[in-house]
Image (cartoon, rainbow, N blue to C red):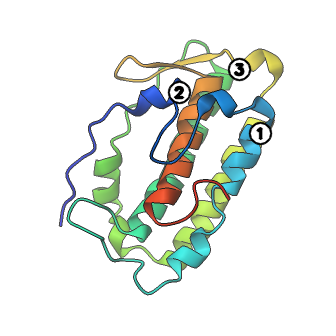
Amino acid sequence: MTIEPDTKDWTWVIEKPCNACGFDPARVRHEDIAARIAASVDGWAERLARPDVRSRPDDHTWSPLEYACHVRDVHGVMTERLDAMLRTQPVCFADWDQDAAAVEADYAAQNPDDVVEQLTAAATGFAELYRLVGDADWGREGLRGNGSIFTVETLAYYAVHDLEHHRVDVGLPARS
């Protein structure tokens, strides 16, 4: 069954706390970002080993496997965006339709063991790139297709929120 696409603009999380998962951008320090990205994979292997990994809790919510695939792909997309921001100014991001990506890659049919490996590798790469961000780089900008402007700093807030929020969606604690 197809899930109705999420059309909400989640960029508000770069300025305000998320009551659903507890993420608060005001409490995120630059020196903690890479570690939080790396830690976002904690618990996913155990969650994806459960027999209900492909079960959707309702008609409007992805299964844990689908969320894991999405989170893996978020790491990849955000790594590409951060890399572009660090290399080029100004930079415009290619649009990414997360719902189309889920259908095209058939998230529900993927092998959970493969997804765990891919998720871990993607998180490691994204975290390592944030470890390389220098003091003068945090204000570098990127423009999303819908006109939203991100800095290296606000991209981190946006990404870390997404990674931690989806942990809650599958029953894991927001932060490990």
118 displayed left or right of 62: right
Quarter occupied by residue 6? top left
152 displayed left or right of 172: right
Q: Amino acid at mark 3?
A: Trp
82 displayed left or right of 165: right
Decide which of tag 2 and tag 1 comes sooner along the chain. 2
Position of residue 22 relative to residue 2, above or below, is above
Decide which of tag 2 and tag 3 comes sooner along the chain. 2
Kindly identify which residue carries mark 3.
138
Kindly identify which residue carries mark 1.
32
Kindly identify which residue carries mark 2.
14
Residue drawn at 34 percent across, 52 percent down: 101
What separation in Å lies between label 2 and label 1 (alpha carbons)? 16 Å
Label ID, residue 166: none
Q: Amino acid at mark 1?
A: Asp
Residue 69 in sight here = no
Q: Residue furthest front?
A: 19
Do tag 2 and tag 3 residues touch (Cβ < 8 Å)? no
Near mark 2 (Cα within 10 A), the count class, few <14, some 14-19 or many ≥20, is: many
